[in-house]
Amino acid sequence: MAPVPQVVLTIAGSDPSGGAGLQADLRAIAVHGQLGAAVVTALTVQNSRGVMHVHPVDSGLVAAQIAAVLDDMPVAAIKIGMLGNAEVAGAVADAVSGTSVPVVLDPVITSTSGAALLSDAALHVVRDRLAPLATLVTPNLAEARALLDGDEPDAARLADLLGVPVLLTGGHAAGDLVTDVLDFPGEGRTREFSAPRIPTPHDHGTGCLLSTSIACSLAAENSVVEAVEHGRRCVRAGLVAARGLGAGPGAVLLLDLPRGDGF
């Protein structure tokens, strides 16, 4: 008899084109051999060319969805992505505050195409109420700058501000080498992970794939460092397999787990 799969809950917006959001998260969770539960925070109108419209889900309905899953399913990890507005962000913070499972927060602020996906009021809720509940926060450079009120992105400063580990991703920086920085607050523990850039225009959903793969690894009881290393390998595999299917940038495609990363 096959082992019972671990349950990973993703709380995020819907991308009807399948490149990012819930659809990408569920695809990644399935590749890990785990069961994906999904709570919708927002409906979007988007495709590979960009985001045309965002419609947040009622915060009460978001809270009810999370409660229904947590009350019934043996959730082993939670990934949080796009939240949209302050009411939804607050509802998610309230809902996960009583859980004891690992939580990975991807503080989505704008889409790859530049569309706003988080209001200013919601940003304060994410920073002050939700991020401190996380096991790991995974901002890119622009998101870290916003969380630091416009100051230069710095993993150590942000980790100390939030009180939780931060993985500052460097994919949006210029150069042929991509460096991500992992910092643990108050411990003087900083790790840098560098690798040559994979040259491709098809990078839609990299943040979703990274944070979801990390959550899957934490669900399997790996350490934060081990989970980050696994997530980075998954993103690189996804970039290698990425293909353009529409008129805009294609989605990263994790088709199989990196060699040696069995689940």
Image (spheres, rainbow, N blue to C red):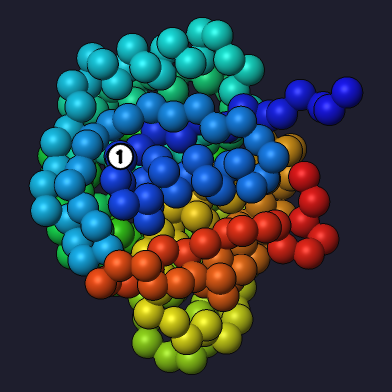
Q: Residues within 10 Å of mark 1 (few under 14, many from 20)?
A: many
Residue 187 image offset from top left, x and y in percent = 61, 54
Q: Nearer the viewer, residue 14 or 158?
A: 14
Q: Which quadrant holds the C terminus?
A: top right
**Residue 123 sits in quarter:** top left
Rendered image quadrant of residue 153: bottom left
Q: Residue furthest bottom?
A: 176
Using the rendered image of the protein, determine whether residue 136 is visible from the camera's viewpoint: no
* Above or below 255: residue 222: above
Position of residue 17 relative to residue 66, above or below, is: below
Residue name at image x 50 percent, y 40 percent: 26
Q: Quadrant of residue 128?
A: top left
Residue 166 spot, x, y in % from top left: 49, 54
| Residue at 78 percent of width and 64 percent of height | 259
**Residue to which mark 1 is pinned:** 13
Q: Residue at horizontal 61%, vertical 68%?
A: 237
Q: Residue flagged by tag 1: what amino acid is it?
A: Gly
Could you tell whether 225 is left or right of 144 in the image? right
Q: Front-most of 87 and 22?
A: 22
Q: Is residue 52 left or right of residue 97?
A: left
Q: Nearer the viewer, residue 34 or 215?
A: 34
Identify the secondary structure beneath mark 1: strand
Quarter of the image for the N terminus: give it.
top right
Count of marks placed on residues: 1
Q: Residue at left 48%, top 16%?
A: 69
Q: Position of residue 18 (x, y in %)?
A: 37, 50
- Which one is in front, 25 or 94? 25
Q: Position of residue 146 (x, y in %)?
A: 23, 58
